[in-house]
Image (spheres, rainbow, N blue to C red):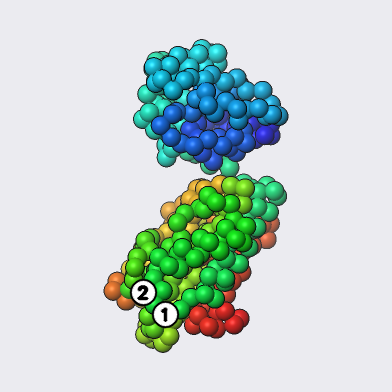
Amino acid sequence: MQFRLDKLIKLLGQHGLAGLALNPGPTLAYLTGLHFHLMERPTVLLVTATGELALVLPELEAGKLAGLPFEIRHYTYSDDPETRPAAFSRAAEALHLPGESLGVEATRMRYLELTYLADALPDTGFEDASDCLADLRMIKDASELEKMRQAAEIAQTALLATLARLQAGMTEKDVANQLIIQLLEAGSDPGLPFAPIVSFGENSANPHAVPTDRPLRPGDLLLVDWGANVDGYLSDITRTFTFGEVEPELLAIGEIVRKANQAGRAAGAPGVEAGAIDRAARAVIDAAGYGQAFIHRTGHGLGLEAHEAPYIYDGSSLALMPGMTFTVEPGIYLPEKGGVRIEDDVVVTENGLESLTDLPRAVLPLEDFLGG
């Protein structure tokens, strides 16, 4: 924890921030090991550029601070909302924050907490600290990578167990529910990265489909996008299968996407721009005439969040570094027909990209996939 805090202090200086205000979430847990719900009672961690910490939290959560391996000043309030401003003011006064910029996570800081902070720090401005926090968390250490490997293994085990139970007439919801059960039985923590996406037939043309009562029928593509959680570290995988005999074009796009996935994984190495991976995968799909049907970026960072930095899109000039983890997930989507996506989790090594996921990538008949 001290190493991570020291790294943050250095980054705050580099980004010109006097400090940081964090809601409950992955970054707060990353720095402190503390886990809080994001709820109607505000909890905020304040970190100064000199390394001082103060935590504002409800009284009923204070017990979580017992046994921490480091000291953290904390300021509690009761269930009466009128007691909250005083807690925020005491924390701000204790840290002597100057009237400069305080960083926040743009995707997590809410109006609720920001209002209390603004009242307690009337001379302080607030700005997006996303770049600073990306620099903090993008490079995974050996212990983080081991948890991600375990999350990938658990997810793959759960999928195989789920597919072995699959039969015609089951709905997308049935399969998604069974997959959740198998993820938990295989060892995933309960907080899954996201609700599994299970889509049949024409529904697989929607990249972020929500499972419905649509039943599985012969001639369908079957797309599954799912992941597991090990101590907060996540996996995120997609595989696509055929159920019965499908249209030849759907088999054709399956092979194109497989080759695009392979090209994207082959393109990555230390020093290579993140955008080069997107361009390599996209070139395969463009050359096959389906460029307009590849409607999203090739990947996104993965770790404590299902979507985090680095983001793998054409315009990204970010130089890849060993320890960065992200997905490679090209896709082709044909409205009213079906779609194929093949997604792997990878880590940048000294020699290239290592895949943490190793299930077959070809779009196979379900029985062949299970038999292999």
Measuring from the top left, give residue 47's x and y in whole percent. 56, 25
Instruction: Give the left or right position of residue 40, taking residue 24 as reference.
Output: left
Mark sitting on residue 168 = 1
Q: Secondary structure at mark 1?
A: loop
Count the numbered circles shown: 2
Disc 1 to disc 2: CB gap under 8 Å: yes
Q: Secondary structure at mark 2?
A: loop
The amino acid type found where label 1 is placed reads Ala
Q: Residue at x 62, y 36 (%)?
A: 33
Is residue 286 among what the camera can see? no
Quarter of the image with the N terminus in it? top right
Crowding at dot 2, Cα within 10 Å, few <14 / some 14-19 / many 20+, comes out as some
Q: Out of 87 and 360, give the one closest to the viewer.
A: 87
Crowding at dot 1, Cα within 10 Å, few <14 / some 14-19 / many 20+, comes out as few
Mark sitting on residue 215 = 2
Q: Residue at x 43, y 35 (%)?
A: 39
Query: Above or below — where is 22 with respect to 244?
Result: above
Measuring from the top left, give residue 13's x and y in whole percent. 57, 27
